[in-house]
Amino acid sequence: MAEQCTPTDAERVAAETVFGDRLELAERYVEHLATSGIERGLLGPREVPRLWGRHVLNCAVVTELIPQDATVADVGSGAGLPGLTFALARPDLDITLIEPLERRCIWLNEIIEDLGLTRVRVLRGRSEQFFDDVDVDVVTARAVSALSKLAGITMPLLGGRGQLLALKGRSAAEEIEKATKVLRKLGGRNAEVLTAGSTILEEPTTVVRVPVGAA
């Protein structure tokens, strides 16, 4: 099955750009996704041929929006998308993966150990359980929930300053409009829709960015 996840030529060029000298580690991560990740139900088997384009690169390019040496929390990390891709692309980041399901946490810890990612930790539980213990510069999430709900389970992890980077689809602008009151209540300001990876991906990643705290 791992043979099916070979990147296209364009995806390989993009991967070389994003991961640089850590490309081999990224390839190992994709192999894990295509084998044990499928076997343990973290991803569906139909996703294997598009692991690079739709998943790994789609997530990893978001690191262009993250400041140097930032602390990051990935809520609902699942198979490490986007959190582990951030760790692979940006070894300067300190990353916390928050995931409620035990079997996913076990898998994440196995992958972290195998890839030697020393600046990544896994917390098992719902993000609300860690509001008093986790204080990061950036909080991110992918395919967790609509922004109006997502804001309440992510933004408190910022401790009143930083930014939420939510990976979204075509409904991003509509989600911002529906979540305006919630975002404002949580200290968010000037939410905007950005794209990441526009120079290297055929389909750039849509990101909702919500700054929190003073301008």
Image (tube, rainbow, N blue to C red):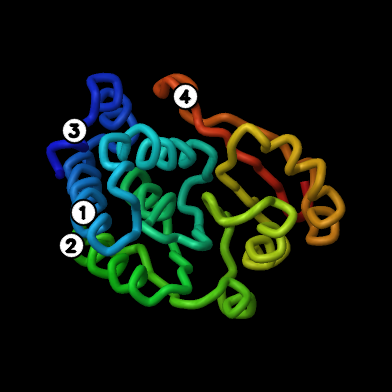
Q: Mark 1 points at which residue?
A: 32
Q: What element carries label 2?
A: helix
Q: Mark 2 points at which residue?
A: 114
List x then y, in percent, for residue 184: 84, 54
Q: Is mark 4 on a helix, strand or loop?
A: loop
Q: What residue type is labelled 4?
A: Glu
Q: What residue type is labelled 3?
A: Thr
Relative to 94, 116 lies left or right: left
Relative to 189, 26 lies left or right: left
Between discs 1 and 4, the one toward the N terminus: 1
Q: Distance between the residues labelled 1 and 3?
A: 13 Å
Q: Mark 3 points at which residue?
A: 6
**Mark 2 vs 4: CB contact within 8 A:** no
Q: Distance between the residues labelled 1 and 2?
A: 10 Å
Q: What element carries label 1?
A: helix
**Mark 1 vs 2: CB contact within 8 A:** yes
Q: Which amino acid does label 2 sit on?
A: Asp
Q: How far apart are marks 1 and 4 (CA)?
A: 24 Å
The quarter holding residue 133 reads bottom right
Residue in the image at 23% along x and 20% along y: 9
